[in-house]
Image (cartoon, grey):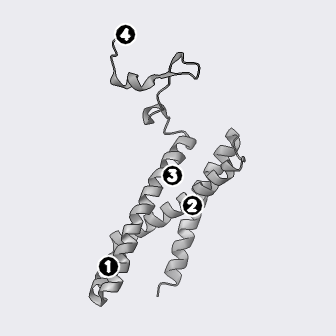
Amino acid sequence: MSIMQDSREATMIGRRSDGTPVRRPLSPHLQVYDMLQMTSALSISGRITGVIWSLGLLLLVWWLLAAAAGPEAFARVQGFLGSFLGLLILFGMSAAAWFHTLNGIRHLAWDAGYGYTIPATYRSGRAVLIGTAVLTVLTWIIAIAFWG
């Protein structure tokens, strides 16, 4: 057996069910993907928006704890959320929520066996992006209309 030049090579060596040795492929890494390709960009964006959405739960917990802590704490949180930075964060969270939701619906369609052709994949990807923009703006128009 040859001396391994790379320790990752050890994870590539396996055996078939009949016992013969085989070299398994490594999982693709981010460097393999073309990030300008819609399918790759939307896949990575789906993961990123999931993380953003999870971090948004921390903001919700902060808001709920402040509401339980009393009027002063709640006023501080409301003051932050009403600031430019707070509104920017809330806008970004709403965009992330809509993207993650619409992309999830797209994946549900795939799980049901629909939309696997390349044209359908690009069409649904564009629909996710357009839907995210439209629903985020619509959400904020409705929120501002009922804010006062």
Task: Report the Cα–Cα distance between label 4 and label 2.
Answer: 50 Å
Q: Amino acid at mark 2?
A: Thr
User: What crowding class fits label 2: few (fewer than 14 Cα within 10 Å), some (14-19), or many (20 or more)?
Assistant: some
Q: Amino acid at mark 1?
A: Val
Earlier along the polypeptide chain: callout 3 or callout 4? 4
Q: Amino acid at mark 4?
A: Ser
The residue that mark 1 highlights is: 77
Q: Are marks 3 and 2 in contact (CB under 8 Å)?
A: no
Q: Residue at x 68, y 52 (%)?
A: 109
Residue 46, label in figure: 3
In the rendered structure, the answer to whether residue 68 lies left or right of residue 23 reads left
When the figure is inspected, residue 75 is found, relative to residue 116, above or below; the finding is below
When the figure is inspected, residue 83 is found, relative to residue 10, above or below; the finding is below
Which secondary structure lies at badge 2?
helix
Earlier along the polypeptide chain: callout 1 or callout 3? 3
The residue that mark 2 highlights is: 101
The residue that mark 4 highlights is: 2
Earlier along the polypeptide chain: callout 3 or callout 2? 3
When the figure is inspected, residue 50 is found, relative to residue 37, above or below; the finding is below
Residue 115, label in figure: none
Earlier along the polypeptide chain: callout 1 or callout 4? 4
